[in-house]
Image (cartoon, rainbow, N blue to C red):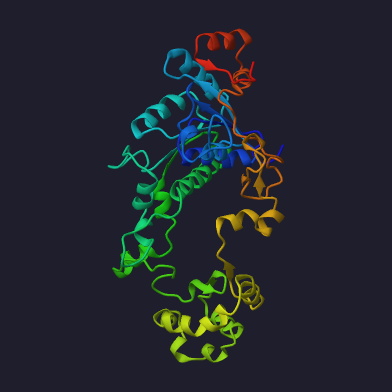
Amino acid sequence: MSGLSKLRVLDLSETVAGSYCGRLLATAGAEVTLVEPIHGSALRSRPPLLTSSAPRRSAAFEYLSAWKRGIALDRSGEAGRNALSRLLDAADIVITSMHASEALAFDEIARASRSALIHVSATSYGLTGPWAGWRSSDLTDWAAGGYLYLTGDPLREPLQGAGPWATYVAGVTAAVGALAALWSRRATGRGQLVDVGAMEAMASSHQWSLVMWSHQGRIKHRANNRHAEAHHPVSLMPVRDGSVCIAAPTLAQWINLCIALDLPEMANDPRYATAGLRFDAAEEIDGRFAPFLMARTRTEVVEHLQSHHVPASAVLALDEVLEDEQLQARAYWAYPEALGGSAKMPGIPFALPSAPESLQAAPELGAHSTEVLAGAGFSDSEIARLVESGVVKLGANDG
């Protein structure tokens, strides 16, 4: 066995952060079981809903729950809680997204007799502090971590970036925390509570925005499509058929860029000698670059700059990303057959020999209930009683 193939994970979360943490562990080889309420996870109704299937499926759920098994369990009564307790006995990691007080109470009970269990709590603000338990959304996650303030036109209101990026960052952080706790357990034999808040995950992702304030008393500001404060060009620039992103913050890259654009005199011009001076002269620099760039396509510009060791990329539209040759060559895309012949979604975001070789589609509600319970030591008669009493729901092809 290699990777995380022996690791058993219970995913009780109903947020993007917790679910993405589980997905990352699953694609690294862990056996991840999604434990849903009888009526299904809240993520099953998260927009957008796909029109290619009936009933309409959530694109987010299909993505976040891929490579997981699924059990539908009513945990509101004693029988359901006892069943979950036995599932926890066989688990290495449990992922939750409960509110602070509920998560702490769950942690106290779950790990009291299971010293090796690792509990990963993924929330917006963490389990302690004055904001613990506050309600949140994709927009507030952006705002609380400081990124909303930095995005958009400096003369306009702040803007949220595309999608729930903040909560995906929290999901990545939760997965890293889970692996750190697992590594610690190898040395100590004991599990831990991994308390992850999206606000902290986002705040830790800033480069020097926080240091600017703590050490210089300056607040980082919005700068449209340019990298604010200190460097240029680190920005988007128009070309004949769209835009390219050019990043040449170092002196060596600046010199290479000037040579590539057939403007060698700019490389030795004292007005552009430092990063700060180049930032102050951004409009002038862009004007001098424009004739060369506007006479060429994105592909021509990027290939030319890369050949001169200048970091550059075409700004791709999403439909272009879906067809891009680099991602195709990396066999990145997954094709969930149940969603239609043309359906495509992001696959495994890393190349790992122990990762699953093929897509395991998101489970139907209760798809693996019998398998999961049997794996935790439940007898056939026990499973039958749970099903008959409505505590467990079986999928259409289960049992």
Quick one: 387 or 115, which is closer to the camera?
A: 387
Q: Quadrant of the C terminus?
A: top right
Residue at 31% x, 39% y: name it. Answer: 134
Quick one: 389 or 340, which is closer to the camera?
A: 340
Q: Quadrant of the N terminus?
A: top right
Q: Residue 206: x and y, percent?
A: 42, 59
On screen, 151 above or below 376? Answer: below
Circle count? 0
On screen, 332 above or below 383? Answer: below
Q: Is residue 271 left or right of residue 291?
A: left
Q: Residue 101: x and y, percent?
A: 34, 31
Residue at 56% x, 40% y: name it. Answer: 63
Quadrant in which residue 130 is drawn: top left
Q: Residue 143: x and y, percent?
A: 34, 52
Residue at 44% x, 56% y: name it. Answer: 205
Quick one: 13 or 296, which is closer to the camera?
A: 296
